[in-house]
Amino acid sequence: MGLPATGMSAEAIAAALEDFGKRDLPWREGGTFAYVYEGGREVEAIIHQAYMRYLTENALDPTVYPSLLKFEREIVAIARDHLGGDDKVVGNFTTGGTESCMLAVKTARDFARATRGIARPELVLPVTAHACFHKAAQYFDMPLRLVEVDTASWKVSPQAMAAAITPDTAMIVGSACQYAHGVIDPIPELGALALERHVLLHVDGCIGGWILPFLRRLGQTVPAFGFEVPGVTSISMDFHKYGYAAKGASVILHRNKDLRRHQIFTGANWTGYSVINPTMLSSKSGGPLAACWAVLNHLGDAGYMEFARRTLAATQAIAASLRAHPDVELLAEPESCLIAFAGKGFSPFPIVDAMRRRGWFVQPQLGYMGSRANIHLSIDQSTIDVVDRFLPDLDASIAEARGLNMALPEPVKALLGSLTADQFTPQLYGQLMGMGGADGGLPEGTTGINMMLDAMQPEVAARVMTEFFNDLYV
Ligand SMILES: Cc1ncc(COP(=O)(O)O)c(C=O)c1O
């Protein structure tokens, strides 16, 4: 397929766009329990308007677009105020949680090199830290030390983190909250550790940073996790999650400019224009910035409090139903608005397909380091309106999964578990996909492939998923 010889009409383009979207997730009206944070039609109109107004402005150069600089300064000021920062705290707007966390890691690496003379700075992470830190370590070629967490609370212990720190550690990481189980690491204790061992501490507040202070004001127990905690040196927080901004909205905050300096790339030794990039991208649309500023100012404190109240009520209703369910169990008591639950003695993966057939999206999570295969739910303010429809469908899907009681035959499971990454070949990949019922396109059902991935060592599962995406995209 090449470029069409003559252009399509505006009407034909609009029709094609609508048509392409028909198989997408039914995210409006709260059908998706991950990926989408739905602020409702009014919020959608606000972000749409602001996004479209600034769509073509280029945030590459704030001297050309003072409007974009103003948006970014105000968003960062709101973020630091929200997270207990003083006016020494600085930050930047990024495209998302991954970019914010990667910038925290890059900053820590270069700070360690510059101020402590460490040749190969390392990162210490709980196994519950988001995969984007692994991505950062891979991109920035930094050794990772992974710390196991307590499998009852799913929180990392400061003692275990202390044991993993070496003279080459640049930074340790804690989450508020972590995605998989939705619990908050002990940030004050990690802060004390960071100060004692002279390392940086990044708090990953990508998913929890914005909503947790509102939940605290609603009476939830939320321990300190912001800049009020001594030892915290950077925080990431996404607005495209519980801030209900358009996608491409997050911030990375540093305790001061001495740290942030190491985040900024400046390229003066080439023949073209001087490139000064505080974040990863160079040219970038002003749309996400304007839309984020717009939704923050549209909802205001009162609007976000109301959203948090609704989200908390929905979370409590869903958690109560799962807690009382005889066939499933919560992996943790929710400390935010995220829930993980597993089947009692049966695979939870068929629940995903059963829910999809009923028009819902719930997210499968593979087992890892004591955290067994489970289903994740990210609950947002829109969910409160659908809880009454969602829970009966979830019950029916759980009953279906329990009835199926799917399990891989033991020899297959043993074989998959014994595979190592260096045995992985394209032929083997083809055989595995055949077994899982996938043909390289988008699969209709996910149960078989999830069960197989769950039986594999993580490195092998990663190879399978890499090949899958390598085939999926042209
Ligand atoms: C705790 C945490 N950190 C980082 C990320 C990555 O964010 P993004 O998908 O915006 O890159 C997520 C995403 O859910 C998250 O929950």
Image (cartoon, helix red, strand yellow):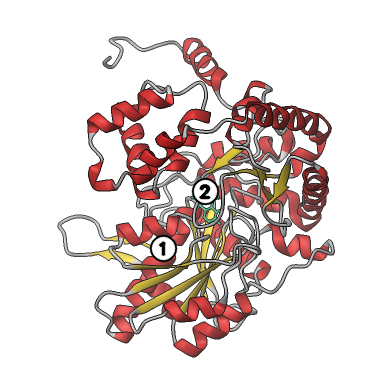
Point out residue 136 in the picture as x, y percentages from the top left corner: 37, 59
**Viewer-closest of 469 and 37:** 469
Q: Residue at x 31, y 58 (%)?
A: 138
Please indicate whether residue 142 sits to the left or right of residue 438 in the image.
left
When the figure is inspected, residue 432 is found, relative to residue 221, above or below; the finding is: above
Q: What residue does disc 2 label?
A: 367
Q: Is residue 263 above or below residue 166?
A: above
Which image quadrant is residue 226 in? Answer: bottom right
In the rendered image, the quadrant that contains the C terminus is top left
Q: Comparing marks 2 and 1, which lies closer to the viewer?
A: 2
- Residue type beneath disc 2: Gly
> How far from the left and from the top, in percent, is residue 105?
40, 67
Q: Residue at x 61, y 67 (%)?
A: 155
Mark 2 is surrounded, within 10 Å at the Cα level, by few (under 14), some (14 to 19) or many (20 or more) other residues, namely some
The residue under label 1 is which amino acid type? Leu
Q: Residue at x 71, y 34 (%)?
A: 30
In terms of depth relative to the viewer, which is nearer, 220 or 430?
430
Res 70 quadrant in image: bottom right
Residue holding disc 1: 103
Tell me the SS state at disc 1. Answer: helix
What is the crowding at mark 1: few (fewer than 14 residues within 10 Å), some, or many (at least 20)? many
Across and down, in percent, residue 180 comes to 58, 52
Q: The N terminus is located in which quarter?
A: top left
Q: Is residue 317 above or below residue 353?
A: below
